[in-house]
Amino acid sequence: MEELRLIGLDFGAATVGVAGSDALFLTAQPLTVIRRKHETKLRQTYQQIEAIIAERGVNAIVVGYPKRLDNSIGDRAEKTEAFAADLERRTGLPVVLWDERLTTVEAHRILDAGGAKREQKEEVVDMLAASIILRSYMEYLGGNPEEKENLLKRIRES
């Protein structure tokens, strides 16, 4: 069986939360938050993601897809689509858009339950949201062997 090494990204206007799957493909671990000064300045963001991909031996990327609650696509989702397309083009890796609705809310809930202070939350909420996105996708693949095989096929072809 081929090894799946994924990263999950929570792409925001000023930050990108990053999470990675473990070697056994059992957990999604928060890794880092990439910050940028301006929403359209992405060159260094791509470079940092590419460095993480190389360091971790990543072979596919999951990007949180911020659909609206009514399932429609807004401005943020369109920017995410463009980011994901650029990332796929730059890295040559398969990029999967994965529904991220309410993941930031869940991340805040987890941090609140753990007693995190506001400053602490700001530092980690994006990477925690990325880990929730990645965990959700990993659970989906675990219950859908055909989809997992489709992803492995895309990886082999990339």
Image: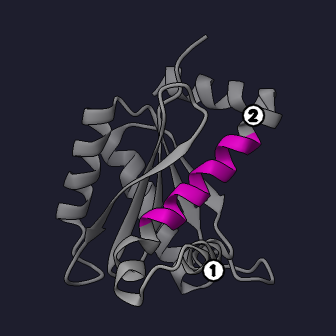
User: Is residue 30 toward the left or the right of residue 49 in the image?
Assistant: right
Does the magenta-highlighted stretch encompass residue 24? no
Between the residue at mark 2 and the residue at mark 1, the CA separation in whole angstroms equals 24 Å
User: Is residue 38 toward the left or the right of residue 143 in the image?
Assistant: left
Q: Residue at x 61, y 34 (%)?
A: 26
- Residue 92 vs 34, above or below: the answer is above
Q: Which mark is residue 146?
A: none
What is the span of residues highlighted in magenta in the rendered image? 127-140
- Specify the farthest residue to the bottom: 118
User: Is residue 124 toward the left or the right of residue 43 in the image?
Assistant: right
Does the magenta-highlighted stretch encompass residue 130? yes
- Residue 118 vs 113, above or below: the answer is below
Pointer 1 residue:
105
Precedes in sequence: disc 2 or disc 1: 1
The 10 Å Cα crowd at callout 1, few under 14, some 14 to 19, many 20 or more, is few
- Residue 63 vs 91, above or below: the answer is below
Q: Position of residue 37 (x, y in %)?
A: 19, 83
Viewer-proximal residue, 113 or 108? 113
Q: Which mark is residue 142?
A: 2
Q: In what element is the residue under mark 2? A: helix
Q: Residue at x 42, y 37 (%)?
A: 93
